[in-house]
Amino acid sequence: TTTYGGGGGGGGGGEYDPAALKSRLKKISIRYHPDKNRVDKVGPVAAAKAEVLCQTATLLVSMLDDHEYTALHIHVHPPPHGAADDAAGDTEASTVFLNRVHVGVTLEALRDMILEERPELCAHKSRLGMSLLAGAGAQETRLSIT
């Protein structure tokens, strides 16, 4: 068993370093790239194997890239009735769907993503709030993201 960037010897189930694994997979992709393994150079069987290895390594790299992202449904609450900056009169909560959000996103960056998707909320930027749910049916936690 090979551990990529992990802390231990030959045992299984240890830590792994996604960056080291990704680096190794990229090297495999380069080594087995079809341009380096043409049929006239390595033969049809070796070329076919190389192409499959390259495609598999490339797919795994993209999966490692995607594991750091998630999709979010965000419940957005504009300011309460009568707020001074309630220019549009929009006080209904709404849902914003963000397809690809990094798991380490800051609240400020998340607010900017929401405002990019829903520019009509820019007038409420200083008073914008969100609800976060741990799961379906879980208790709501409301945050201010000013």
Image (cartoon, rainbow, N blue to C red):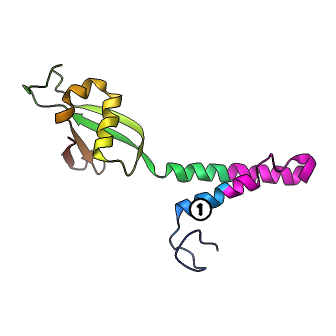
Residue extent of the magenta highlight: 27-56
Specify the amino acid type for callout 1. Answer: Leu
Q: Quadrant of the N terminus?
A: bottom right
Q: How crowded is mark 1: few (under 14 residues within 10 Å), some or many (20 or more)?
A: some
- The reply, left or right, for residue 25 in relation to residue 33 is left
Asked if residue 20 is positioned above or below residue 10 in the image, the reply reads above
Q: Does the magenta stretch include residue 102?
A: no
Q: Quadrant of the C terminus?
A: top left
The x, y position of residue 137, in whole percent, is: 26, 47
Residue name at image x 31 percent, y 50 percent: 135
The x, y position of residue 120, in whole percent, is: 27, 23
Asked if residue 129 is positioned above or below residue 102 in the image, the reply reads above
Q: Does the magenta stretch include residue 40?
A: yes
Q: What residue does disc 1 label? A: 21
The x, y position of residue 115, in whole percent, is: 30, 31
SS state under label 1: helix
Closest to the observer, 137 or 123? 123
Residue name at image x 75 percent, y 51 percent: 52
Residue name at image x 53 percent, y 50 percent: 65
Give the dominant element type of the magenta stretch: helix, strand or loop. Answer: helix
The x, y position of residue 19, in whole percent, is: 54, 60
Closest to the observer, 21 or 139? 21
Tell me which corner region of the image, top left, top right, bottom left or bottom right, holds residue 95.
top left
